[in-house]
Amino acid sequence: MPTQQLSKVTELKDISERLVEAIVHQPKVDANEVRKFLGKARHKDLDQLEKQVAILKSLLKKMGVPFQAARELDELRMDIDDRWAVALETIDGMLEER
């Protein structure tokens, strides 16, 4: 094997060994703490969104916008809530794998 190729093989071996070492020595993640943190973030986010949607619906009503617009805002809120649930489930799966 030419020395240039041998040098690249050695370099790749060193990199892979460092990656394995870094993975093995990753700090432990407190899964319950992560879940609690994300649960609070979700609750805060959805609470703020709920307030914003209520304000927007009120303003739209005063402006004479059809009721269907308010329902669209409710759908948006529900979609975001559903997306939070999916994200938390995915993250929980990642935490379980560790």
Image: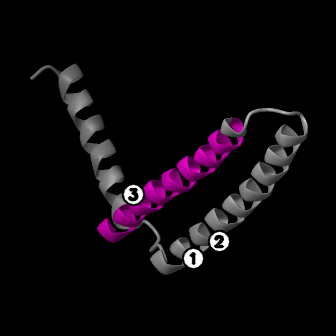
Residue 74 magenta-drawn?
yes
Taking depth in this image into account, of 81 and 87 the one nearest to the observer is 81
For image coordinates 65% across by 65% down, the residue present is 41
Write down the residue under mark 2. 40
How far apart are labels 3 and 2 at the CA level? 17 Å
Q: Quadrant of the N terminus?
A: top left
Mark linked to residue 90:
3
Question: Which of the 4 image quarters holds residue 3?
Answer: top left
Residue 16 magenta-drawn?
no
Residue 4 vertical placement versus 77 (above, below): above
- The magenta region covers 69-98
Number of other residues with Cα within 10 Å of mark 1, as a class: few under 14, some 14 to 19, many 20 or more: few
The amino acid type, in three-letter code, at marker 2 is Lys
Judge left or right: residue 38 versus residue 25: right
The amino acid type, in three-letter code, at marker 3 is Thr
How far apart are labels 3 and 1 at the CA level? 15 Å
Marks 2 and 1: in contact by CB < 8 Å? Answer: yes
Q: Quadrant of the C terminus?
A: bottom left
For image coordinates 90% across by 40% down, the residue present is 62
For image coordinates 43% across by 60% down, the residue present is 91
Residue 30 vertical placement versus 17 (above, below): below
Taking depth in this image into account, of 62 and 91 the one nearest to the observer is 62
